[in-house]
Amino acid sequence: MSRYDAQGRLELADRIRKTVLPERGQIPMFVYTDPDVYELERERLFGSTWLFLAHTSEIPNPGSFVVRSMGEESVIVGRGDDGVVRVFLNACRHRGMRLACEDFGEVANWRCPYHGFTYGSRGEFMGTLMGAPFERSAYPEGLDRDALHLVEARAEIYQGLVFATWSRSGPSLDEFLGDVRWYLDLIVGRAEMEVVGVPERWMVPTNWRLPSENFTADAYHTATAHSFLSRLGMVKGVDFGRDGYHVDPGGGHGLGIGVHFDGESYFPAELAEEYATRLDGGQAQTLARVKNLHGNVFPNFSFLIPNFIEIEGRRVSGAMLRVWQPAGPDRTQVWSWHLVERGAPEWWKRLGRKMYIQTFSSSGMFDQDDTENWEAQTRSSNAALYRQEEFLLHYGMGLDAPPLPPGEFPGPGDVYDGKFSEAAARTYYRVWRNHVLEEVR
Ligand SMILES: [Fe+2]
């Protein structure tokens, strides 16, 4: 049964309009895993919005590339010898075969493994058909180079973060990110950052939006789902997730900043100078109080400074990026990057890697807690799809609470005192609804 026809789509749009009411703190559970909602998202959301693909340190040289996804579509992210990063649909124009079959590499050109059509990977010839086997005898009339150019996405970079979109006419990346840029700077702009190793990937039987909204606006779950931190004496009390700020920077992005009151920065003194040269006064002052920071760039790109924990007697954290790549309405491929300051002291790099593996890698303690919940929510949603009445969920935390007056916090956006708020999740669903109902652009 599919509503994938004009009438069905109108009915679905009507149902979304009537029941997805974040203004009232109401989200119906069917949107979590409904296959028809997912089809709308593939086309109207992943087909048009900016999507994070890679960090520039992953493609350092001319000819280096990585293979990533935009929604479910495979793309090549490559750097030309002119230094420009370009993004192409990973599909040969001859028969649509996947052009780059490896995860990453460094090549002089891309050659299709099926019939051998070969495309440039360098500078202005990136994505241009350079030749085909036995071209003169197979195609005596010649091949139209322009018509056979790889399909190219629009790519832009912010602080080393490579994003792309299929939209030709939408907002620029800067306009799209807006006020969340000030907060992204604290993670990836505070120093010259580099990705450690290659990103980890694993599959989770959940809808991609559940982890995305968790990073956007869910500090509340930490007291219950991650209470081990307190029980093992790694933090002071189970309410460790409350102290700090919840931020709704607009655009569907969202974040929470956990702060400490110890006076001195938890970050290594060796990096203080680099931080000071790259951050403005308000950002430096905020970073000095950070004990953790979680957030999400709409729709599915999360960022994190995990809770500082003690390893080998030293307090350590780091920087982490996530993409919750949809692989069907109830399956998500998790991409997880660990980043570190290139100029960091050896101890911070070594212990930071241990911190990453213990907390938020595929075997991380936090991920195991979270995954259990996202899986079960997904199963509940699939079960509810077979029922007639709406299963309405509660997204009302902080609905009537006003943000801090301007000037109370150095960063932009609506900033709430204390992290227990779902304000940014409500904006997330407003923006999401606009996309799937095509009320944007
Ligand atoms: Fe969590």
Image: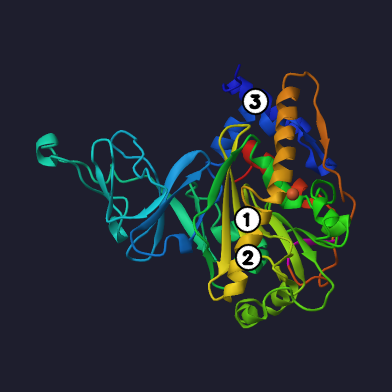
Query: Of the residues shown, which amino acid type is indicated by label 1?
Result: Ile
Callout 3: CB less than 8 Å from ligand 1: no
Q: If you read the primary sequence from the N terminus, does the residue marked by circle 2 or circle 1 appear first?
A: 2
Q: Nearer the viewer, mark 3 or mark 2?
A: 2
Question: Where is residue 178 shown, x and y percent of the image?
Answer: 64, 61
**Residue for point 84% across, 47% down:** 224
Question: Where is residue 213 shown, x and y percent of the image?
Answer: 71, 46
Query: Of the residues shown, which amino acid type is indicated by label 2?
Result: Gly
- The residue beneath circle 3 is 10
Query: Of the residues shown, which amino acid type is indicated by label 3?
Result: Leu
Mark 1: which secondary structure?
helix
- The residue beneath circle 2 is 352
The disc placed on residue 357 is: 1
The disc placed on residue 73 is: none
Q: If you read the primary sequence from the N terminus, does the residue marked by circle 3 or circle 1 appear first?
A: 3
Mark 3: which secondary structure?
helix
**Residue for point 37% across, 43% down:** 101
Q: Nearer the viewer, mark 3 or mark 1?
A: 1
Q: CA distance from mark 2 to mark 1?
A: 9 Å
Can you name the residue that lies furthest to the front here? 312
Please state the extent of the stretch shown in magenta in the rendering.
412-418
Q: CA distance from mark 3 to mark 1?
A: 46 Å
Q: If you read the primary sequence from the N terminus, does the residue marked by circle 3 or circle 2 appear first?
A: 3
Residue 298 in view of the camera:
yes
Position of 159 relative to 3 (above/below): below
